[in-house]
Image (tube, rainbow, N blue to C red):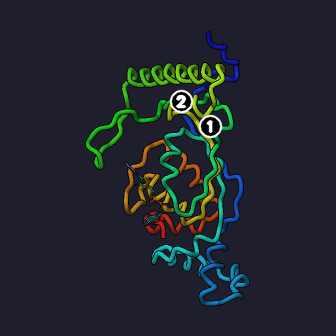
Amino acid sequence: MTDTPADDLKPSFRSDVTVELVKHTASDADVLFAARVSTVGEQSLDELGKDPERSKGLINYLMRDRHGSPFEHNSMTFFISAPIFVFREFMRHRVGWSYNEESGRYRELQPVFYVPGADRRLVQEGRPGKYVFVEGTREQQELVTRTMEDSYRQAYEAYQEMLAAGVAREVARAVLPVGLFSSMYATCNARSLMHFLGLRTQHELAKVPSFPQREIEMVGEKMEAEWARLMPLTYAAFNTNGRVAP
Ligand SMILES: Cc1cc2nc3c(=O)[nH]c(=O)nc-3n(C[C@H](O)[C@H](O)[C@H](O)COP(=O)(O)OP(=O)(O)OC[C@H]3O[C@@H](n4cnc5c(N)ncnc54)[C@H](O)[C@@H]3O)c2cc1C
């Protein structure tokens, strides 16, 4: 017989993701400071606020001609909570990123699971590389919600049953699905974030279109909004130059 899970261990279902900017040293001035050492040497910090139009022009030039390294002298740390299948995609981004994720060995995983919201297009049409997603029918939406929730409940009950019987967390977690939410800190700089956004968002200004899964795009869009606020000139230059990382 299994223990009845406590109320706070009852599965809950989410259709959104969490992205919080928890720490940053990131501004357009960091780009100018790094770039101007080429021509002004160690005095370059004094030059920063002097000529805004020139600063904007310099950032645009660096972006256009893909002089990338000045965009690395800054740092943003995000707290992200999203389904494990999003993290699998996210952590493929190796360069200019640092990650720390919650452990399924050292803590009991909480029963929070992803169920697509009503606005998530459910049906894929076309062939790989050339497909589009369209709305599902009401029946398909109901099916997705019902079968996902049932399946998540069953999986979490199995997890709880094993923990209650003394099985180690690292063993019992094998039954949990990739729709389970995880959380991590991810630290990047503007250059690595631009590379990520170029691949993981769709945008009308993108010179090279990408076709990311919607759920990682939801994370990307929230990160993009935070970054745009911190580095407006860099962000504008990224868009003007086709959203290709320098
Ligand atoms: C729409 C989409 C679909 C995808 N589908 C799949 C899939 O089906 N299967 C799959 O396995 N992956 C898939 N991926 C992941 C993809 O192949 C990349 O691993 C991921 O996008 C990270 O990109 P990246 O390697 O450029 O980034 P990073 O790892 O951050 O690297 C940044 C850049 O550094 C350079 N670099 C990094 N490492 C090396 C290296 N070892 N050698 C040479 N240069 C290097 C490259 O210029 C690279 O672009 C997909 C990605 C997208 C966006």
Ligand 1 shows up in the quarter that is bottom left
Q: Tell me the tag on residue 104.
A: 1
Front in this rendered view, residue 52 or 171: 171
The residue wearing badge 2 is 176
Quadrant of the drawing holding the N terminus: top right
Vertical placement of residue 239 versus 48, above or below: above
Q: Is residue 60 left or right of residue 211?
A: right
User: Marks 1 and 2: in contact by CB < 8 Å?
Assistant: yes
Q: Is residue 200 left or right of residue 137?
A: right
In the image, what residue occupies the spot 46% across and 52% down?
201
Front in this rendered view, residue 244 or 95: 95
Residue 41: which quarter of the image? bottom right
Which of the two labelled residues, at mark 2 and mark 1, occupies the earlier sequence position? 1
Q: Residue furthest right?
A: 46
Vertical placement of residue 157 versus 242, above or below: above
In the image, what residue occupies the spot 52% across and 51% down?
91
